[in-house]
Image: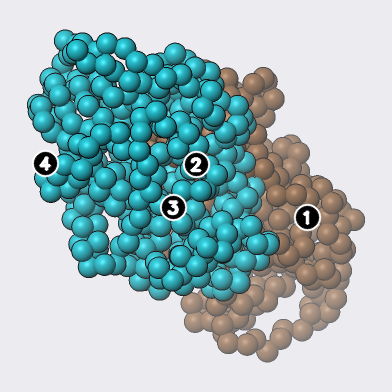
Chain colours: A brown, B cyan
Amino acid sequence: MKTNREWILRRRPEGPCVVDDFEYRESEFVNPALEPGHILVHNSVFLCAPTLRNWMDAPSNSLYPSIDLGAPVLATTAGRVLESTDDRFPVGTRVTMIGHWQKYDVVNSAVWPVRSVPEGQDLIEAMGPMGMNALTAYFGVTAVGRPLAGETMLVSGAAGSTGSVAAQIGKIMGCRVVGIAGGPDKCDWLINELGLDAAIDYRAGNLVEQIHETCPNGVDVFFDNVGGEILQAAVENINKFGRIVLCGQIAGYNESRPVQGPTNMMRFIYGSVRMQGFLLGDYEDELPRAREDMATWINEGRLKHREDVRTGFENIPTVYGEIFTGTNEGTLLIVTDEDAYATN
Amino acid sequence: MKTNREWILRRRPEGPCVVDDFEYRESEFVNPALEPGHILVHNSVFLCAPTLRNWMDAPSNSLYPSIDLGAPVLATTAGRVLESTDDRFPVGTRVTMIGHWQKYDVVNSAVWPVRSVPEGQDLIEAMGPMGMNALTAYFGVTAVGRPLAGETMLVSGAAGSTGSVAAQIGKIMGCRVVGIAGGPDKCDWLINELGLDAAIDYRAGNLVEQIHETCPNGVDVFFDNVGGEILQAAVENINKFGRIVLCGQIAGYNESRPVQGPTNMMRFIYGSVRMQGFLLGDYEDELPRAREDMATWINEGRLKHREDVRTGFENIPTVYGEIFTGTNEGTLLIVTDEDAYATN
């Protein structure tokens, strides 16, 4: 007899989500008869992606999913396929996917993004340096922002899981890269470990001026994970033909109202500025090239990554809350099973 | 002896500009010794472009020029070259340009956009159906918005000089086109004269709902001349991979604060939405193709245009104010000289 473990969305969070917004459940699990194009996955790793917080809100006008109250929490997970009616993911395949905070997880792989993990890679690597945050950074920089060598690229949330990869890819592409982060320790890390050209502590004074000082030639590409005031300050420094990559808006994920947008539309017009949102899924066909580039850069030591690995299925909601307080150091993962470390 | 006539910016307008913000001056004009790359132009036509109002404000962070107090008003004009040190514009050439509210106007044609008017075209045509508003619409639709046949294109300020051309080009490209305008008469004109598929009177009820009703498949391309609440309402209806063309933000030109930007950045992200500003000058190299396309469409009767022609140099500030009250019908021009009607 199998026991399933799951975290249910009990109520919609008000502001930051807290443990009481969720309910832990155990129940007997019997393998279901899968409909066509479905997979049953045994999850071993859970990625704390900020955007999950959006999915916990009531349905809105923002084109993202809304988790039903009483349903398991929709989440970024990795695990091994136990049963399958999808030829792309036979039994035994290890996958990363949009699944749920569940040990045994049935997913419609025809609808939700599921990606197989290549042999030789464990699930930590597949969720970390080669994971969806890292790949999101790759496409955000190379396909959306498209910086040219010599240009100035500014990155918000630069010490975070996605931002740190975006910033380093900017360096690899020959840009002057400036990162924005919270606190002197993170700023030191950006400069001394990642090799960025400058770092801005957003808690340390006027942002518009700090950007102006660290980007004396203006900002050509702004890779934004934060939004709100930081986005506004970047717009005030954006150059003619500047590009703003909208990757995340973490400043507003815990707010009940939509995040404020930038207010200086005239600068967009006279600057011929392009602001563009994107999702990793838009570039599904180009994943092989991305993975090849990323693996090369990692092997050459040009792309550093750090994971902050925690354990215990029972701790998922508590650990998840940390991404909003910024106490994690690197990509925040929760490992719930030793299969996380298998490489085939 | 020549007498120059000019309108000087006497003080910065608060809200809508009024005649007292300007001062009329006459003075003896002696042809100056031109520096290299300059032209002396005798202006005969003045185009009332909404964006001039921005230029009357104090210097800001919005990348557009600010007219000095006591200087002649920077403006879109057309006339004939009287003296020249720029080989591209020999004496006798007729030009459209960013000049000034002046009869005799010295322009640095190496810095400011100047374009020659082809033989056979009078200056009304060069400022109207083939003018900068019309060409701006052309590039905004074809180069920035890039709608595909069968897509839905929404246009704000659709009865205006730029918007009416943008909307018709959308039809020519095979789109379903919906126009937003103020009042039932303009809406009737959009449907019955320009052949749009639907029209929205922005004064007649909830905009988000009106867009939803007239664009049941959502909005693929939004061509925005207005900004503010109209931009926000369009964002709430924008489709996956939608494009927002930022052409103008007339809703805020008379405001002392920057126009509000859209607040739903998450829809930009999950919708992979692109919002892009642009200026006609970005596409200077492609003007010949644009003019050819436009001339073909006009000759085929597929692109209609109306000009609202007024007269009298002394009336410039009064007439200019009408573009913000919407009492003009079509591209608002002020003719100050019979040379406006010459075709070579």
Residue that carries the numbered disc 1 in the rendered image: A316
In the picture, measured across the screen, residue B93 lies left or right of residue A109, that is: left
Q: CA distance from mark 1 to mark 4?
A: 77 Å
For mark 1, name the chain: A
**Quadrant location of the N terminus of chain A in the rendered image:** bottom right
Residue that carries the numbered disc 3 in the rendered image: B329
Is residue A132 in view from this perspective?
no
Can you tell which of label 1 and label 4 is closer to the viewer? 4
Residue that carries the numbered disc 4 in the rendered image: B344
Label of residue A278 in the image: none
Q: Amino acid at mark 2?
A: Glu
Relative height, residue A204 to residue B270 (above, below): above
Residue A135: image location, x then y, percent: 49, 52
For mark 4, name the chain: B
For mark 2, name the chain: B
Q: Amino acid at mark 1?
A: Ile
